[in-house]
Amino acid sequence: MASPSAILDAPWLFPARAKLVKDFFFQSNIRSNTGLPVPVVAVGKLNYPDLAEAALRDGMCDMIMLARPLLADPYWPQKAFSGRTSEIAPCIGDQEACINEFIHGGHLQCAVNPRAGFEDAMEAEPAIASRLKKVAVVGAGPAGVICACTAAKRGHEVTIFERFERAGGCLIPGMALKIKFDLANYADYLNSELQRTAEKYPLIIRFKTEMTAEALKEGKFEAIVISAGAKPFSPPVEGINLPHVVQAIDLFRNPSLADKANKVVVIGGGSGGCEAAYFLSWEKGKEVIVIEMLPYFMKDLCTANRGYMIHFLEQKGVKLLNCTQLKAMDEKGVLVIRNLSPTVPDPYVTWEPVLPENIENPLAKPIRVKEEEMRLEADLVVLATGYIPDDSLYEQCLKERISPEIYNIGDSFSRGGQGWICHRKNTLSTLAFRLSRPLFWRTIQKNLFRLY
Ligand SMILES: Cc1cc2nc3c(=O)[nH]c(=O)nc-3n(C[C@H](O)[C@H](O)[C@H](O)COP(=O)(O)O)c2cc1C
Ligand code: SF4
């Protein structure tokens, strides 16, 4: 678990701020009531042990404090102390479960730690199951990996299948952006956790193996867990099959798709679309426009993450067009219908919306409609129009009753997240809300309990 150099240069680096305070206190001879120097504590994204240690060693601060890293892994200090840093489940900085959960009226959770906030219901160490089974887990994204490792630790004989050469699922394309180094770190953790578990428990890892219902049937598994993830949604509009129209996930998997393009239009201003715009403008030097049919970009994202992203996009001159709907695409660009009413919110203002969607704002001004058709030039169109559960294998397994127990977890159960970009949820009800938690811990937990 190494800290990337990008983080050391970050303007928000907290040890640097701590050092400023420490120097100021020293130069101004500011002391505590007892006459001793005031200890200065550095806090903020110090989940990389080498970074935290360097802050202390280099005299940037007197102590370090961890908040989110301890939600992600309460054993961080023990693991760091004993040099087992690859075993630390790392905080990915998404703020979805620890901060946004409060905003939406829930309680503290963590996107990478299923036990955080549910310590009363889940044991720290999973107990051996009363009846041991032969289990298949299909898909090694975060949900599949955690499920497979937990089931193996409970004594089940588990095989996990993954069509790519490593675990991580949609984290892998998501970490294409340099600023998403936290996701790369998390993917490393998932892979090392699989290897560690396989060394000690009955877990077999089968990478580069695409499973079908027939192959699963032949395996005679007593329980099958499908964690096949989600697939990108393509809106049914004219021009969708043109060669210069690509999905954001494909662009992240294969950035050379953007090599020949100068002007890019991104369809969809959720976090996926905005991160594609960030990637194209900051890392690829393209001229980028993002269209979003809703009044706000990334409206469900945690305010801090959203604010940074909007400022970064503004800094690179990315045009954010809200209240703008896709009508059609052709070889030369995109046809949209845009609401040009002055009541449409300024997309670069980051403190709006003031309240989350589930709380009505009685002072909110209505948005009037003054629509106009517009053409936007583009030699590349990137679709970021959401994801739908990839549940076809699950449905087929169910239909053919290939095993006595068949479960569907993670994004293939309910696409509540933007997964590799950040995470999202719906607000239909508390249950739906919980089921669509970032990594669907509740579904995983529920199924694991049944599996046990
Ligand atoms: C769930 C949660 C609650 C927090 N509550 C407070 C708070 O009440 N007051 C405060 O000053 N900071 C609060 N913070 C901020 C943390 O103290 C800390 O400064 C911040 O999370 C950055 O450190 P980290 O990267 O180690 O998480 C909170 C953070 C989290 C995740
Ligand atoms: S929810 Fe995300 S940001 Fe919050 S502690 Fe967990 S991994 Fe970190």
Image (tube, grey):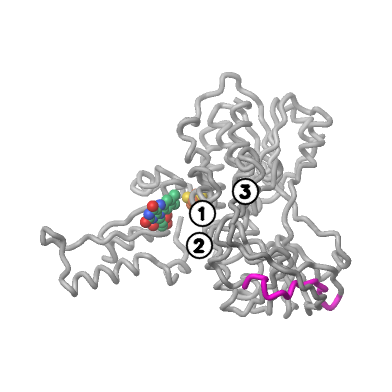
Q: Quick check: is the Cβ at mark 1 less than 8 Å away from ligand 2?
A: yes
Residue placed at 62% from the left, 55% from the top?
420
Q: Which residue is mark 3?
A: 167
Residue placed at 38% from the left, 61% from the top?
51
Cα–Cα gap, marks 3 and 2: 29 Å
Q: Mark 3 packing: few (<14 Cα in 10 Å), some, or many (20+)?
A: many
Q: Which residue is mark 1?
A: 95
Image coordinates of residue 106 in percent, x first then y, are 53, 43
State yes or no: residue 253 in magenta.
no
Q: Amino acid at mark 2?
A: Ala
For residue 242, above or below residue 286: above
Is the C terminus in the top left, top right, bottom left or bottom right quadrant?
top right
In the rendered image, is residue 121 in sight?
yes
Highlighted magenta segment, given as a residue range: 331-346
Looking at the rendered image, the disc whose residue lies closer to the viewer, 3 or 2, is 2
**SS category of the residue bearing label 2:** helix
Residue 383 occupies quadrant? bottom right
Q: Mark 2 packing: few (<14 Cα in 10 Å), some, or many (20+)?
A: few
Asked whether 300 or 308 is in front, the reply is 300
Q: Which residue is mark 2?
A: 304
Q: Residues at badges 3 and 1 in contact (C-beta under 8 Å)? A: no
